Image: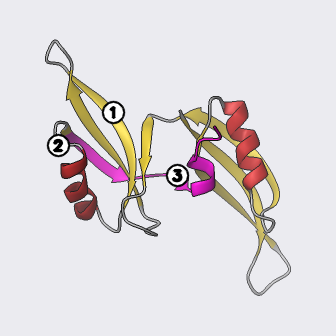
Amino acid sequence: MYYQLKVKFYLPKEGSDQLEKKNKTFLVESLSCAESEGKGLSWIPDNYQDPCVTGCSESKIIDVRREFGDSETWWEVIMGDENEKGRLIPFHIAVNGSNHMQVLKKLDSLYSTSEFIGIKRLNAIVEDELVKSSS
């Protein structure tokens, strides 16, 4: 399962002694919100000052695919498969790629039996350490 973990923290403001408040959402693979919080907080970089989890919710994403090397642009893609009654059952995947057309071309070969429903920029940050299974 994947969870969206919202974290508030402070970073030094460039060129000043002040701190700037930041809010980011991270995608975390885990079995529960509590596990996501622990995994996320233990991962947070040292320069994130006073990190605090402000929210956690189960994501609709069922799979994360790094298909295009180091591209840090992530897309949430909704695909669908028909059930035995002919009803389209949607599923969500996260795929990296520089643009949506690149991702769609790759998905055509990866999910050739599924129907494309939609695509949008993913509103969470994907870090490899947070989306790898701990098992």
Q: Is residue 124 above or below residue 84?
A: below
Q: Which mark is residue 124?
A: 3
Picture residue at 43% right of the left edge, 41% below the top = 63
- As drawn, the residue found furthest toward the front would be 135
SS at circle 3: loop
Q: Which one is earlier in the sequence, the residue at label 2 or at label 3?
A: 2
Residues shaded magenta? 116-135
Whether residue 127 is visible, yes or no, is no
Please name the residue that numbered disc 2 is placed on. 112
> Viewer-proximal residue, 111 or 16?
111
Type of the residue with mark 3 = Ala
| Image point (26%, 38%), residue name | 79
Residue 81 on image: x %, y %: 22, 29
CA gap between label 1 and label 3 equals 17 Å
Instruction: Give the labeled residue for mark 1.
Output: 91
View extreme (top): residue: 85
